[in-house]
């Protein structure tokens, strides 16, 4: 069942033209819209379903700069600066709380990896560091586990996914962006080698720039236009508990499960690294890009053929711009949660925190996490058509780094000198031999 998100009123009529059309109303798309409006550009956000209807409302809600892969660190720091000021910037509660976040371990080799990460990122001056066994116990007095260490950041935190993207979208709307839900983009056309207009199920919008921030649907949309974007998907499960006493105000990652406190008094719980891959035509076509990533995670993932082989983001679909597209068939892609993972997650939570034994599952949901071969997103011009940009492939990190990603995309589109080096996020790296070495710290 899909998690509930705050409702947002759509603008009724499509604009005849917009400086920028954004495809996708998730956290990245709405943050880009807000940043573009602050630069005086006219913006239309087109969402096939509802704002934050897919992965932007289905994630754990963690917002952190700590333990990011090295190419992501500057973008994560930019994002966290934006998150900390988000409620003031948009004029309403964004759902963000700066509570501190931590990851715990019983494995000395993991502590050594954390030490290496801290040394590699020392020049950035981030706050936090390693906690001893005694300090970890003091931070988590309710746990029955005997952790030997933790890596902790006092300036990280969490935000409520059901609140954040709709609140940011409302702010962009108040500042002049138009938001169009239940309005799928079928594609775009060019004139004299440049983008000329975007075609939607409700009509056309003239534009010179389009930002594809369509999450797991990005590859399908781009493929129609001859743009190759290596993207895979992992089906994940998460749930929230009934309200309970506070055992930690922030989030805690552990080998079996991770949790974070919620505004409603419960806890959001997810299984660390666990999920399934469904074989699809596009997935098989791109398998060579993902071989090393799958080998790395083969013990955590199950593989099967499901309904998504014929219908879903990885299906092999074609359509004409004047005919209904696959995006209109899947307004909100709503994978079922895995009951086995829910049962295992709740049992692990109860075992680690005996005082939580009375908590029950209040709501559960599935989601599709889109990923790139090196688990670093693409924020980049896309293909050879001037004016086409891509911000996708966030590999489970999109909610946390969404504000920075949207900001960086807006700077690119506006022709500004980027505040964060965009080189690590180039699409071309997957084809010119410069893709990143995988560092999955957490």
Image (tube, rainbow, N blue to C red):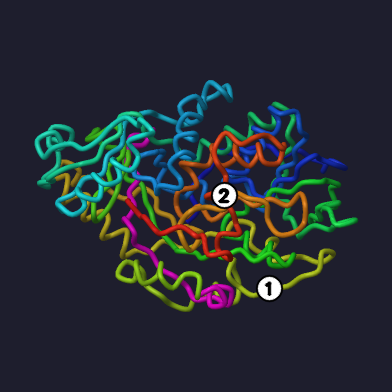
Tell whether 201 sits left or right of 132.
right
Picture quadrant where residue 310 is located: bottom right
- Distance of label 1 from label 2 (alpha carbons): 22 Å
Q: Is mark 1 on a helix, strand or loop?
A: loop
Q: What element carries label 2?
A: loop
Q: Nearer the viewer, residue 262 or 392?
A: 392
Crowd band around label 1 with a 10 angstrom C-alpha radius: few (<14), some (14–19), many (20+): some
Picture coordinates of residue 435 (x, y %)? 50, 60
Picture coordinates of residue 378 (x, y %)? 57, 53
Tell whether 186 sits left or right of 312.
right
Tell me if residue 303 comes above or below residue 38 in the rendering.
Answer: below
Q: Which mark is residue 404?
A: none
Picture quadrant where residue 356 is located: top left
Outermost residue to the right: 192
Bounds of the magenta segment:
261-287
Q: Residue 53 carries which label?
A: 2
Picture coordinates of residue 59 (x, y %)? 44, 48
Query: Residue placed at 61% from the left, 73% from the top?
Result: 315
Tell me if residue 317 comes above or below residue 335 in the rendering.
Answer: below
Query: Residue placed at 36% from the left, 72% from the top?
Result: 295
Determine which residue is flagged by label 1: 317
Of mark 1 and mark 2, the one earlier in the sequence is 2
Tell me if residue 15 comes above or below residue 282 in the rendering.
Answer: above
Residue 271 in the magenta stretch? The answer is yes
Query: Residue placed at 52% from the left, 50% from the top?
Result: 424
Q: Which of 180 and 404 is in front in this view?
A: 404
Residue 121 in the magenta stretch? The answer is no
Tell me if residue 274 comes above or below residue 206 in the rendering.
Answer: below
């Amino acid at each position: 069942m899909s998690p509930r998100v705050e409702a947002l009123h759509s603008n009724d009529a499509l604009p005849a033209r917009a400086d920028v059309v954004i495809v996708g109303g998730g956290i990245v798309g709405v943050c880009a819209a807000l940043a573009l409006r602050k630069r005086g550009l006219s913006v239309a956000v087109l969402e096939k379903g509802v704002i934050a209807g897919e992965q932007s409302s289905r994630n754990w809600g963690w917002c952190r700069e700590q333990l990011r892969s090295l190419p992501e660190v500057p973008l994560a720091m930019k994002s966290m600066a934006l998150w900390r000021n988000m409620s003031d910037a948009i004029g309403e509660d964004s759902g963000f709380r700066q509570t501190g976040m931590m990851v715990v371990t019983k494995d000395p080799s993991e502590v050594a990896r954390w030490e290496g990460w801290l040394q590699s990122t020392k020049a950035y001056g981030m706050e936090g560091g390693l906690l001893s066994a005694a300090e970890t116990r003091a931070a988590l007095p309710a746990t029955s586990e005997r952790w030997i260490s933790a890596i902790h950041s006092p300036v990280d935190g969490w935000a409520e996914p059901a609140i954040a993207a709709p609140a940011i979208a409302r702010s962009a709307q108040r500042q002049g962006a138009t938001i169009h839900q239940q309005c799928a983009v079928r594609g775009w056309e060019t004139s004299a080698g440049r983008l000329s207009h975007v075609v939607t199920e409700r009509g056309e919008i003239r534009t010179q720039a389009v930002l594809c921030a369509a999450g797991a649907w990005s590859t399908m949309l781009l493929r129609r236009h001859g743009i190759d974007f290596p993207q895979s998907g992992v089906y994940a499960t998460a749930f929230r508990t009934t309200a309970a006493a506070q055992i930690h105000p922030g989030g805690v990652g552990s080998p079996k499960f991770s949790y974070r406190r919620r505004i409603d008094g419960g806890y959001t719980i997810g299984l660390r690294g666990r999920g399934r891959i469904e074989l699809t035509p596009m997935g098989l076509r791109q398998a060579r890009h993902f071989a090393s990533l799958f080998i790395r995670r083969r013990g955590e993932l199950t593989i099967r053929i499901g309904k998504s082989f014929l219908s879903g983001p990885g299906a092999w679909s074609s359509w004409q711009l004047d005919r209904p597209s696959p995006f209109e068939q899947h307004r909100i892609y709503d994978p079922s949660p895995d009951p086995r993972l829910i049962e295992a997650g709740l049992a692990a939570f109860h075992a680690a925190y005996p005082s939580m034994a009375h908590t029950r599952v209040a709501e559960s949901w599935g989601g599709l996490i889109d990923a790139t071969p090196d688990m670093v997103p693409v924020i980049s011009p896309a293909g050879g058509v001037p004016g086409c940009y891509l911000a996708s492939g966030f590999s489970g990190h999109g909610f946390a780094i969404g504000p920075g990603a949207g900001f960086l995309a807006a700077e690119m589109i506006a022709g500004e000198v980027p505040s964060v080096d965009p080189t690590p996020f180039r699409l071309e790296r997957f084809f010119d031999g410069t893709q990143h070495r995988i560092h999955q710290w957490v």
